[in-house]
Image (cartoon, grey):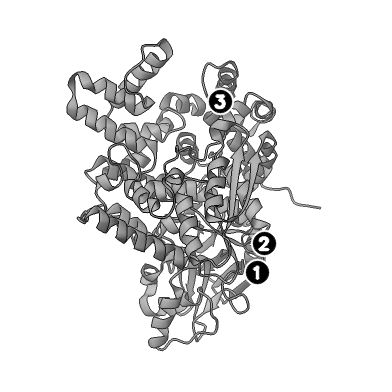
Amino acid sequence: MCGIAGLATGDGLLADDARLVSRMLEVLAHRGPDDQHAVADSHAVIGARRLSIIDLDTGRQPVSSEDGSVQASLNGEIYNYLELRADLERKGHRFTSKGDSETIPHLYEEYGARFVEHLRGMFAIAVWDAGRRRLVLARDRLGKKPLYWRLAGDRLTYGSELKALLQDSSLERTLDRRSLAQYLQYGYVPAPRSILVGVEKLPPASTLVWDGGVPRVERYWDLAYEPKTHRSLVGDCEALLEVLRESVRLRLRSDVPLGVFLSGGMDSSTVVALMAEHSPTPVKTYSIGFEEPAYDELRYARAVANYFGTSHTDEVVKLDAIALLPDLADHYDEPFADSSAIPTFRVSQLAARELKVVLTGDGGDEAFGGYRRYQHQVAIRLAARIGGPLHMPIVRAAQFGLARAIPRSRLRRRADSWRRFAERAPDERYVSMMSLTDAPQREALLGDPALADQDGYLGKLLSSGSRNELDRTLRADTLSYLPEDLLVKVDRATMANSLEARSPLLDHRLVEFAAALPEARKIQHGTTKFILRQVAYGLMPKRLVDRPKMGFGVPVGSWFKGSLGDRFDELVLAQDARVRDHLDPSVAARLIAEHRVGLADNGARLWLLLMFELWARRWLEAPRPTS
């Protein structure tokens, strides 16, 4: 694990280029505090920061081929490196280290830019082929590791985080208005765009090849939901357990101790169970809870930890966690509006006191159908098929979990709202569920109707998916919400604390296995993650599996009625607020006023605006030169 940065140029390096890459690497020190190194020739500088996890003594990066003509740096881990190394040695390649990163230049020599198809892991990679003066960038299939890049004239710079590229004084910090509109809708800026004009993110499952001229970005992998497998339930469960065990086993390859982020939910509990099978000592587990009972999962996490006899550490996040706001703005160097970054940051701090590596349960919901919105989709589709007098009770049950509708005014209004929602086209429902603001709100904030509609981003993903509605939604989540929100959250929070997070449920072979399963293996009779649940029953008591799903929410709604609301006033509503340069401040004032008196729950939208303000203060203005 590390951070990477570098540049390549067609006309030859400038005098300051090596120092520029050094500065880029220095601001990535949190990603790799153990070492910093770069190599250069007449046309490129390629560098890396290192967090030593595998081959502690000789695993320095960048790494090279035998003759030094191919240099490579890796952010992440290649889990199948032992198998790749053995195959490469049979083909005559010689290695000087025992680490995973050294497989990359040799794979490149064998397969060119298609080397990435042989990797099983999480990664952002840079390869410099000096003989061809070719730069190759690559990102893992599901987008676990980030990679930003910029082409200016004949110079291409890249780095693990946006802050690395900002070390180049020639980069103007100009806000991209369309990216801002996407942020206001989704809470993140989806690849390939970034929040700044002229900077792009390499999308997941993509390579970039540049040898002068226009960079060629190509997708090397896609997730297929057809054809479906046709096995018995027992056969599917046995096959899934085998894939799960292999995925966990590969992620235990490390020369330092490992732990687990444990929420007490099915996904992380399953990872703990499988990790315990391989561990001769108690597994180290880490959890976060809240004072507010509706958000607190600690009782579930502690029950799982007690059953498996783990060495458990947990902490309750209180309102004073808003002291983390400057840290969030510093490490999320694009605007990012997922408030669960707070508990993720805190649990990362807990684990980093003892470890360099943790496993997580991320990915189970997207692979196996764990979100409530998937239940709603199936229920609404069933209601549409049945029609007649049964239609509305089923639709209402999908929203409220009730057997019948209750004719009370507030509940009735919610039911009517849900009925109108259910009558929309399936893809429209999905976009609505994934949006933090609606088009009128965005138009009011931006003052531009043309920018308010950003539905096309998700609409394109949905239109290119399966005919099955659930599969389309799972695919859209896996290609958008997962890499752009959840994995960004985990990467920045863990790396801010020099901690590596590995996600067994996001092994691409496991994800492919899940995609090929029929719908009934994911949601059956209203039960989510049906097949994963059956496997989990064989690993732990049912009481630990069949618990209410809570998600990883944060009580920002109540916080905004207290001191966080005061902080909002001080920052977002201030006369010198940066938000005033880009958005209508009167909309922000109305949203906080409505929230305080209970007219609307605007917690997510207020957090959206607060994080944009903090980001703009931290990153949109270039720092003044020191005297």
Q: Nearer the viewer, residue 237 or 247?
A: 237
Q: Nearer the viewer, residue 303 or 409?
A: 303
Q: Mark 1 points at which residue?
A: 36
User: Residues under labels 2 and 3: Cα distance?
Assistant: 37 Å
Evaluate if marks 1 and 2 touch, with contact meaning CB atoms under 8 Å apart: yes
Q: Compare marks 1 and 2 and give the one earlier in the sequence.
A: 2
Residue at point 54%, 46% (across, down): 303
Q: What residue type is labelled 3?
A: Asp
Percent across and percent down for residue 119 are 41, 69
Q: What element carries label 1?
A: strand
Residue 26 bears which disc, if any?
2
Q: Nearer the viewer, residue 330 or 584?
A: 330
User: Residues under labels 1 and 3: Cα distance?
Assistant: 44 Å
Residue at point 57%, 24% (across, down): 588
Crowding around mark 3 (Cα neighbors within 10 Å: few <14, some 14 to 19, many 20+) is: some
518 over 100 or under it: above or below: above
